[in-house]
Image (cartoon, rainbow, N blue to C red):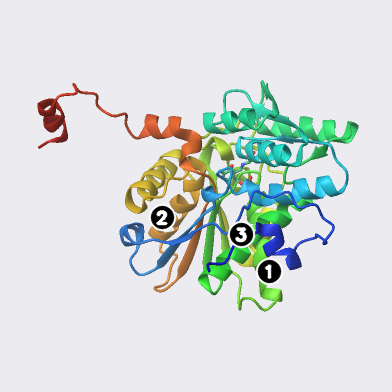
Amino acid sequence: MPKVWHGLIREYKDFLPVTDKTPVVTLQEGNTPLIPTRRLNMAINPDIEIYLKYDGANPTGSFKDRGMTMAVSKAKEQGAKSIICASTGNTSAAAAAYGASAGMEVFVLIPDGKIALGKLAQAMAYGAQVLQIHGNFDEALTLVTEISAGFPITLVNSVNPFRIEGQKTAAFEVIDQLGFAPDYHFLPVGNAGNITAYWKGYQEYLAAGKSRKTPRMMGWQAAGSAPIVLDQIVENPSTVATAIRIGNPASWKGAVAARDESGGKIDSVTDEEILAAYRMIASLEGVFCEPASAASVAGLIKSNKAGLFNPGDKIVCTLTGHGLKDADVALSVIDTPQTVDAKLPSVLKALGF
Ligand code: F0G
């Protein structure tokens, strides 16, 4: 019998702030694939080993489910009836889904016109009350923080510490799946909760004797939204990777600590580099991620060109969200199909036979 997965809270309860009385709100998230790459690996550098932690395979299609199962379970434990968040899309989809499962009211603030359609569709379908603001994510986060301070509504952005607790389990899974900690861990950075969470997870597994070392944490911002790299707030962030279009990350300090304590780096990649990596991951490995996720692989390609790696280095890149979330970008940057008559000669001609 294959082992049945019970969701990350039950699987990692010894490492999480839960008790037997915590009402677990779960969609059986976690246990996402760690995919060893072949063609991508050959194209980038055959002397290193590249793995993709595909968190787009979570129930709502992004890593946000990891934090949300914890945040919503703890909110329920504390008697909350409603939750609120600001989002570039994925957090709102996850909050809406877990809120629906818990029977809670969910309020979401998003930047007008700047989130991928799939994510908006999810939040609406799960029944959240969604409000678009004429403003960016940073402004939305300020607003929901004020609302949750003034009303009995639990804030479930990653400033909620239970979100980080849930998200750190991705580092546990990497070690459990690989058998050891990688040399480098690459991931996109937006609000900077995830890099903070991974670093916490890697440190906790080391302390528990589950690994012998921690990886260097390598965080990647989009060039038009790179406040940590520039060391200053970006007032009007812009990037094709709307998920990480953030100018003033809430977990800024956590990201800097992860970078400095692990001996890693936080740097930026251009939209062109992000989209080139996005196409490579899909066409060489059959793994479809959203543009923001590809910032991790874009960062790996950039680091490889700079000569960072030694032969044999083991590298994990997190793919944070599913490609279907943002089909518009795929069709606009890659191509749209040709249309022909439903006749064999036309089809054969178009296919090049
Ligand atoms: N990748 C994806 C697909 C995301 O949705 C996000 C963040 C990130 C990377 C960056 O992670 O914020 O922990 O540094 N999305 C948030 C949201 C902001 O509202 O869905 P981070």
Residue for badge 2: 301
Residue for badge 3: 170
> Where residue 228 appears, x then y in whole percent?
63, 47
- State left or right for residue 246 relative to residue 332: right
> Where residue 294 appears, x then y in whole percent?
47, 47
Decide: is 154 above or below 169. above
Camera-nearest label, 1 or 2 = 1
- Category of crowding for the residue at label 2, using alpha-carbon neighbours closer than 10 angstroms: few (below 14), some (14–19), many (at least 20): some
Decide: is 242 above or below 78. above
Which residue ends up furthest to the front in the rendered image? 1
Residue type at tag 3: Ala
Which numbered tag is attached to residue 34?
Answer: none
> Where residue 65 appears, x then y in whole percent?
64, 47
Q: Is residue 235 visible in this depiction of the protein?
A: yes
Q: Nearer the viewer, residue 145 or 233?
A: 145
Camera-nearest label, 2 or 3 = 3
**Helix, strand or loop at mark 3:** helix
- Distance between the Cα atoms at labels 2 and 3? 23 Å
Which residue is drawn at the image coordinates 54% and 49% (left, top)? 320
Q: Is residue 240 visible in this depiction of the protein?
A: no
Residue type at tag 2: Ile
Decide: is 244 above or below 316. above
**Helix, strand or loop at mark 1:** helix
**Helix, strand or loop at mark 2:** helix
Q: Quadrant of the C terminus?
A: top left
- Distance between the Cα atoms at labels 1 and 2? 26 Å
- State left or right for residue 347 relative to residue 24: left
Residue type at tag 1: Gln
Q: Nearer the viewer, residue 38 or 292?
A: 38
- State left or right for residue 13 relative to residue 178: right
Residue for badge 1: 203
Mark 3 or mark 1: which comes first in sequence?
Answer: 3
